[in-house]
Image (spheres, grey):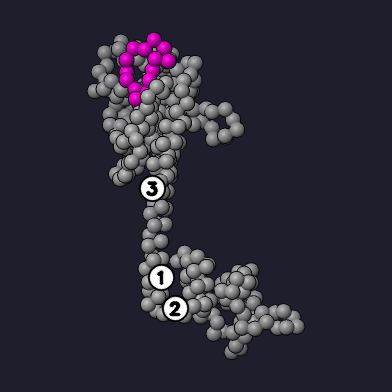
Amino acid sequence: MKEYYSIGETARLNNISIQTLRYYDKIGIFKPHYTDKDSGYRYYHIKQFFYLDIIKYLKYVRTPLEEIKRIILSACTPEHIQSFLDEQETVIEQEMEKLERARRLLQRRKKQINEQLDICNKKEEDTIYVRHIEEQTILKVETAQITPHTPPDLFIRKLADVLEERGDMVDNYYGFIYDLTSYKDSHDIYFNSIYTTICKGEKINIEGENITLDTIPTGEYVCIAFDWSTQHYYKYYQKLYEYIKSHGIQTTGKVYQLSLPINYNSSREEQFLTELRVQKK
C-alpha cells in the first residue's frame, strides 16, 4: 500500500472536493505533506486522513472554520474538546429550535393560504356568509386615531419587532379589531387594536408599550369579503352591519378585520383581500 496520494486521490478517497482541499491549504487548516517543487503537485500522507476526518466531523456539527483551525493547530486536550463539544451542542440545540419555529411558521402560513383561497371563493359570490373559525392566539398592539384611511405600518412594525427580538418572524397575516356599531362613514371607524397571529402556546415576554397577548375565540362568524378599497370599505361594512341587525343576530359586539396580500411584488400597487368578521353569540 502506498503512503502518499495526490490531491485528486485524496479528494476521491475522502469524499471531499479538490477545491475544498486547496482552500484548507490556503487558510492553513489542512496542508499537504509536501508539494513537488517542480510540478507544484500536492501530496498527502495516508496518516493525514485521520485528521481530515476530524475536520469533516467538526464541520458536520456546525463548527466555524476559524474554530476548527484553532482546534487543529493548538494543543487541545480531551478536556478542551469535551468543553467545546458541550458548547457546540448548545449551538445546535438553538439552531434546532429556530428550525422548529420556522416549520411552525411555514405550517401556519400554509393554513392561512388555504383560508385565503376559501375567502376568495366567498368574495366572488359577493354575499354575506357564516363560517366556523378556530381559536387563534394573537399578539396585538393598542391603537389610537387609526381608521381604515390611516396607514397602520408603524403599529405593524411594533408587532414585528417583538417577534424578531425573540428570533421569530411575523407573517403576512394582519388583523384589526373595532366596535360593531352604526357609523356615518368609514372615517368614523377607529380601530381598537392591530394584531397578527402566533403559534398557539407560544410564550412571549412582552415589554413593548400597549402590546398584549390575546385570543380570537372559536365560534361561528358572520362575514363579508372584498378587495381592499378605502373608497368602498364603508359599503361592505354597512352591508354586513345591516344584515346582522335585520336578522336579529346576537353578537359579541366586535368586528375582526383580516387583511391578506393578493400579490407579493413590492413594485406593484398594494392589493389586499379583506374579510370582516363578527362572532355570533
Residue 232 in the image: state x and y as whole percent: 47, 16
Measured Cα–Cα span from mark 2 to mark 1: 10 Å
Residue at position x 34%, y 22% from top? 178
Tell me the amino acid under the disc marked 3. Answer: Arg
The N terminus: image quadrant: bottom right
Residue 159 in the image: state x and y as whole percent: 40, 37
Under circle 2, the secondary element is: loop
Q: Does the image show residue 109? A: no
Query: Count of labels shown?
Result: 3
Residue 87 placement, left or right of 34: left
Residue at position x 70%, y 79% from top? 41
> CB of mark 2 within 8 Å of CB of mark 1?
yes
Asked if residue 185 is among those painted magenta in the image, a careful observer would answer yes
Q: Which mark is residue 84?
A: 1
1 or 3: tag closer to the N-terminus: 1
Tell me the amino acid under the disc marked 2. Answer: Cys
Can you identify the residue that label 2 sits on?
Answer: 76
Give the magenta-colored segment's residue range: 178-192
Q: Quadrant of residue 147?
A: top left
Can you identify the residue that label 3 sits on?
Answer: 166
Tell me the amino acid under the disc marked 1. Answer: Phe
